[in-house]
Image (cartoon, rainbow, N blue to C red):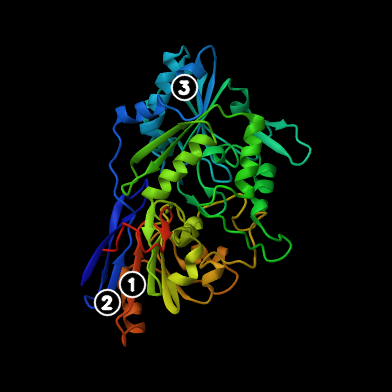
Amino acid sequence: MQKIEIPWGQWYEQSVRILSFPDDWEVHVCRMKEAQTLSGQQIADRLDHPVGTKTLEELAAGRRSACIIIDDISRPTRGEALLPPIIEKLTAAGMEYSQIKVLLALGGHRPMTRQEMTMKVGKWVIDRVAVLNHSPFSKDLVTVADDRQIIKINRHYMEAELKIAVGCIVPHTLAGYSGGAKAVIPGIGGIETLHSNHTLVYEDKSKSMSFKTSTCDPDNPMRRNMEEIVGKVGLDFICNVVLNDRMETADVFAGHFVKAHRAACERAEELLRTKLVPDADIAVLSAYPKDTEYSQIGTCFAVLGHHKERCIRRDGTIIAMTAASEGAGFHALFGPGMSLFSPHDDNIPPQELGGIETMIYSDGVSAVDIGQFYTGQIPLVLGDWEAVLGRLTEKFKDKKPVVAVYPMGAVQIGHFDEKEEGEYE
C-alpha cells in the first residue's frame, strides 16, 4: 500500500493521519513549496524594514497607548512568535505594558478561552498585557460617520493612539487573501458592518446567494470596502506573515496596510503555489490548518480556486477532510439560522462540483452534528480511513483511479501552469 502523511488538528491534536492507497493506483500528493522558518532575529529585522511606513519605534514615539489586533484560533498565525518583538519595540519607545492591549479579531467567530489565548499568543504576552475578545454584538462599539453604510468598530481599538494588526496571508474565497485591512473589517467590526461588507460579494442576494468568487484576487469589492473603512478608522502598522508547509513563519511583511499587504500577497503566491491534477477520479482535500471546526470545511476547496471543474471528474469522488477538533463550530453570519445562512446552498461540495459523490473524513463530528448545515442529503461521514478506502476500492474496482491529495487545501494556491517548478510526488 502507498502511505501518505497528512497534517491534522491545527492547535489541538497537532498530529498526522496516514492515508493508504493500493500500490497500483496513480496517486499524486500535491504539496506547496518548502521554505525555511525565520528565526526570531530575522522576524525582528523584517519589522525594522517596513514597507510604506516609518519604523514601529518611530510611529510609537510620543504615543501613550497601543492596540494590537490579531486573528483568532481558527487561523494559523503564530502570535507567540510575532507579538513579543512588537510589544518590546513599543516599550522601547516609552510605553508601559499597561498601555498596550491585544485584541482578538474574532469577526463573526466565537470568543476564545484563556487557555486558547495562551496557545495563540503565548504565555509571555498573557503575563504582560491585556488580551481581550472582540464581540460584534457589543453595545460599546464606536460608530463612525458614513453616509453609505453603518460603520461600528471596537472601542479599545478606536481609543488607542497607535493601531497595529497582525495576521497571516492565505487565500480567502471572499476577500481574495486574508491579512491587511481584513483584521479590522470583519475582525473588530459590529455585526451590521460585517453584514454589509460580506454581502458585497453576492451577485444577487435576493436570488441564489451565490457569490462572485474572488480567491487570490486582492482587487475585489469586499477588499476595497475593507480598505475604505480602514482609511476612515486608521491602521498605522501591519505585520503579515507568509507561512511555510509546517505552518511556521517563512516571511514577514510589515508596514502600510495596503502596500505591505500586497507585497505579502505576492510572496504568498510564490510559497503557497501548488500544481493541480486535472481530471482526477478521486480528490482528497484537507481543510488543515483551518480544521478547528466543521463549519470551515468548505475552505478545503480553496486550493482548486477557479479550476474546480477541471480537477475532478463528474463520475469521481471527493473526500473532504477535517479534524473538527471543536465540533460543528459557530459563525455569526454564515452559521445555521444567521443572516447570511442560505437554506438553498448546502455546506459542501461547492456549486461547481454539485452532484459529485462527496464523503467527509472526520472523527470530530458525526452526521448528527453536521445535519444543521444541510437541507438536502447529508454527505456520508466516516471517522476511519479504512472505511473510506473500502468504499473507494469498491467503486473503482474496475479501474486504476487517478488520486489527487491536497494536504493543506485551505491555504494552498492551485495552478495548472505547465512551467510550474513544483511537481507531484
| Secondary-structure class at tag 2 | loop
User: Residue 363's quadrant in the figure?
Assistant: bottom left
Q: Which mark is residue 391?
A: none
Q: Which residue is mark 1?
A: 403
| Secondary-structure class at tag 1 | strand
Q: Outermost residue, right direction?
A: 147
* Label 1 – label 2 distance at C-alpha: 7 Å
- Please provide percent x and percent y for residue 214: 56, 55
Residue at 59% x, 55% y: name it. Answer: 335
Q: Which residue is mark 2?
A: 25
Q: What amino acid type is highlighted by mark number 2?
A: Trp
Nearest the camera: 98 or 207? 207
* Label 3 – label 1 distance at C-alpha: 48 Å
User: Residue 63's quadrant in the figure?
Assistant: top right
Residue at 54% x, 73% y: name it. Answer: 354
Q: Which mark is residue 56?
A: 3
